[in-house]
Protein backbone atom coordinates (compact mmCIF):
# COMPACT_ATOMS: atom_id res chain seq x y z
CA UNK A 1 0.00 0.00 0.00
CA UNK A 2 2.89 2.35 0.77
CA UNK A 3 4.21 1.85 -2.76
CA UNK A 4 0.93 3.09 -4.23
CA UNK A 5 0.91 6.14 -1.98
CA UNK A 6 4.45 7.05 -3.04
CA UNK A 7 3.51 6.55 -6.69
CA UNK A 8 0.49 8.86 -6.36
CA UNK A 9 2.64 11.55 -4.72
CA UNK A 10 5.26 11.30 -7.49
CA UNK A 11 2.66 11.52 -10.25
CA UNK A 12 0.93 14.49 -8.63
CA UNK A 13 4.22 16.30 -8.07
CA UNK A 14 5.45 15.83 -11.64
CA UNK A 15 2.94 18.24 -13.24
CA UNK A 16 3.99 21.31 -11.22
CA UNK A 17 7.65 20.55 -11.89
CA UNK A 18 7.07 20.61 -15.65
CA UNK A 19 4.83 23.69 -15.46
CA UNK A 20 7.87 25.94 -14.98
CA UNK A 21 9.04 25.01 -18.47
CA UNK A 22 5.71 25.58 -20.21
CA UNK A 23 4.89 28.07 -22.96
CA UNK A 24 4.60 30.99 -20.53
CA UNK A 25 8.33 30.94 -19.88
CA UNK A 26 8.92 33.21 -22.90
CA UNK A 27 7.01 36.05 -21.21
CA UNK A 28 9.63 36.08 -18.45
CA UNK A 29 12.11 37.55 -20.95
CA UNK A 30 10.17 40.83 -21.24
CA UNK A 31 12.32 43.74 -20.09
CA UNK A 32 15.49 41.68 -19.79
CA UNK A 33 18.08 44.26 -20.86
CA UNK A 34 21.26 43.62 -18.84
CA UNK A 35 22.59 40.16 -18.00
CA UNK A 36 25.53 38.59 -16.30
CA UNK A 37 26.96 35.89 -18.54
CA UNK A 38 28.16 32.73 -16.85
CA UNK A 39 29.74 30.14 -19.17
CA UNK A 40 30.64 26.81 -17.59
CA UNK A 41 32.43 24.21 -19.65
CA UNK A 42 34.77 21.28 -19.50
CA UNK A 43 35.64 21.71 -23.18
CA UNK A 44 38.62 23.64 -24.52
CA UNK A 45 37.91 27.01 -26.18
CA UNK A 46 35.72 28.19 -23.29
CA UNK A 47 36.91 31.80 -23.67
CA UNK A 48 36.05 31.73 -27.36
CA UNK A 49 32.55 30.45 -26.54
CA UNK A 50 32.03 33.25 -23.99
CA UNK A 51 33.24 35.95 -26.37
CA UNK A 52 31.07 34.68 -29.23
CA UNK A 53 27.95 34.48 -27.02
CA UNK A 54 28.56 37.94 -25.54
CA UNK A 55 28.98 39.39 -29.04
CA UNK A 56 25.69 37.91 -30.23
CA UNK A 57 23.88 39.23 -27.14
CA UNK A 58 25.29 42.72 -27.63
CA UNK A 59 24.36 42.71 -31.33
CA UNK A 60 20.75 41.97 -30.34
CA UNK A 61 20.73 44.82 -27.81
CA UNK A 62 21.35 42.99 -24.54
CA UNK A 63 24.03 44.54 -22.35
CA UNK A 64 26.46 42.03 -20.88
CA UNK A 65 27.78 42.96 -17.44
CA UNK A 66 31.58 42.80 -17.29
CA UNK A 67 31.47 41.31 -13.79
CA UNK A 68 29.21 38.28 -13.32
CA UNK A 69 29.97 38.07 -9.58
CA UNK A 70 27.28 40.66 -8.71
CA UNK A 71 24.02 39.13 -10.02
CA UNK A 72 21.86 41.65 -8.10
CA UNK A 73 23.06 44.52 -10.33
CA UNK A 74 21.59 42.96 -13.50
CA UNK A 75 18.15 41.91 -14.74
CA UNK A 76 19.16 38.27 -14.87
CA UNK A 77 21.96 35.75 -15.14
CA UNK A 78 22.38 33.90 -18.42
CA UNK A 79 23.98 30.55 -17.60
CA UNK A 80 25.50 28.60 -20.48
CA UNK A 81 26.62 25.04 -19.83
CA UNK A 82 28.79 23.31 -22.44
CA UNK A 83 29.64 19.82 -21.32
CA UNK A 84 31.02 16.58 -22.65
CA UNK A 85 29.65 13.53 -20.89
CA UNK A 86 31.76 11.10 -22.84
CA UNK A 87 33.19 10.78 -26.30
CA UNK A 88 29.80 10.93 -28.04
CA UNK A 89 27.56 12.53 -25.40
CA UNK A 90 27.54 16.31 -25.51
CA UNK A 91 25.22 18.85 -23.89
CA UNK A 92 24.45 22.55 -24.36
CA UNK A 93 22.09 24.20 -21.89
CA UNK A 94 21.16 27.85 -21.59
CA UNK A 95 19.04 29.07 -18.72
CA UNK A 96 18.02 32.46 -17.44
CA UNK A 97 17.94 33.05 -13.70
CA UNK A 98 15.94 36.03 -12.47
CA UNK A 99 14.78 37.38 -9.18
CA UNK A 100 11.07 36.72 -8.80
CA UNK A 101 8.69 37.46 -5.96
CA UNK A 102 6.30 34.71 -4.97
CA UNK A 103 2.80 36.11 -4.57
CA UNK A 104 1.88 33.53 -1.94
CA UNK A 105 4.73 34.31 0.47
CA UNK A 106 5.98 37.70 -0.71
CA UNK A 107 9.55 36.38 -0.65
CA UNK A 108 11.96 37.10 -3.50
CA UNK A 109 14.05 34.24 -4.89
CA UNK A 110 16.50 33.67 -7.74
CA UNK A 111 15.05 31.02 -9.99
CA UNK A 112 15.31 29.68 -13.50
CA UNK A 113 12.60 31.31 -15.61
CA UNK A 114 13.62 30.19 -19.11
CA UNK A 115 15.79 27.42 -20.53
CA UNK A 116 16.92 25.70 -23.72
CA UNK A 117 18.71 22.38 -23.97
CA UNK A 118 20.35 20.48 -26.83
CA UNK A 119 22.24 17.23 -26.57
CA UNK A 120 23.99 14.94 -28.98
CA UNK A 121 23.81 11.43 -27.64
CA UNK A 122 25.83 9.33 -30.03
CA UNK A 123 25.24 11.59 -33.04
CA UNK A 124 28.20 13.94 -32.67
CA UNK A 125 31.44 12.37 -31.63
CA UNK A 126 33.61 15.31 -32.68
CA UNK A 127 34.18 18.58 -30.87
CA UNK A 128 33.16 20.36 -34.06
CA UNK A 129 29.53 19.85 -32.88
CA UNK A 130 29.90 22.54 -30.20
CA UNK A 131 30.09 25.76 -32.26
CA UNK A 132 26.97 24.90 -34.26
CA UNK A 133 25.08 23.76 -31.17
CA UNK A 134 26.02 26.91 -29.26
CA UNK A 135 24.89 29.03 -32.20
CA UNK A 136 21.52 27.20 -32.31
CA UNK A 137 21.08 27.64 -28.56
CA UNK A 138 21.91 31.36 -28.60
CA UNK A 139 19.70 31.87 -31.67
CA UNK A 140 16.81 30.12 -29.88
CA UNK A 141 17.24 32.42 -26.87
CA UNK A 142 17.56 35.58 -28.97
CA UNK A 143 14.57 34.67 -31.14
CA UNK A 144 12.35 34.33 -28.06
CA UNK A 145 13.87 37.45 -26.50
CA UNK A 146 13.29 39.50 -29.66
CA UNK A 147 9.72 38.14 -30.01
CA UNK A 148 8.71 39.47 -26.59
CA UNK A 149 10.85 42.65 -26.57
CA UNK A 150 10.37 43.78 -30.14
CA UNK A 151 12.72 43.68 -33.06
Image (tube, helix red, strand yellow):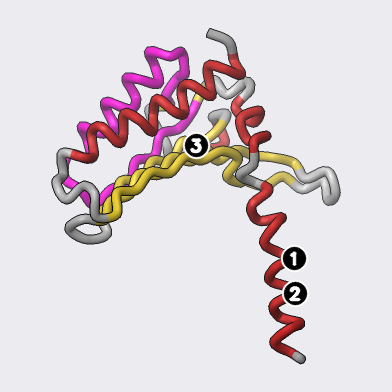
Q: Please identify the residue farthest to the front as the structure is shown.
A: 123
Residue 7 lies, with reference to residue 120, above or below; the image says: below
User: Which segment did they paint magenta?
Assistant: 35-64
Instruction: Look at mark 2 in the image and give the residue it sits on.
Output: 8
As helix, strand or loop, the secondary structure at mark 1 comes to helix
Q: Earlier in the sequence, mark 3 or mark 1?
A: 1
* Residue nearer the viewer, 110 or 11: 11
Gap in Å between the C-alphas at discs 2 and 3?
Answer: 36 Å
| Residue 138 position in % (x across, y down) | 39, 29
Q: Is residue 105 left or right of residue 151?
A: right
Q: Residue at x 34, y 41 (%)?
A: 39
Mark 3 or mark 1: which is in front? 1
Q: Is residue 102 left or right of residue 96?
A: right
Residue 73 quadrant: top right
Q: Is residue 123 left or right of residue 16?
A: left
Q: Which mark is residue 77?
A: 3
| Residue 102 position in % (x across, y down) | 77, 45
> Is there a contact, CB below 8 Å, between mark 1 and mark 2?
yes
Q: Is residue 80 left or right of residue 50?
A: right
At label 2, counting other C-alpha atoms closer than 10 Å, the crowd grade (few under 14, some 14-19, many 20 or more) is few
Gap in Å between the C-alphas at discs 1 and 2?
Answer: 6 Å
| Residue 117 position in % (x across, y down) | 43, 44
Q: Which mark is residue 61?
A: none
Instruction: Look at mark 1 in the image and give the residue it sits on.
Output: 12
Amino acid sequence: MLRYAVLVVLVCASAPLRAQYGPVQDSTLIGLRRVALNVTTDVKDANTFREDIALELRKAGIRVAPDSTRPDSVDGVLNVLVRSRGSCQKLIRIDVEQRARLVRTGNTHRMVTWFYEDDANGTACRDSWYPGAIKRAVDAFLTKWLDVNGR
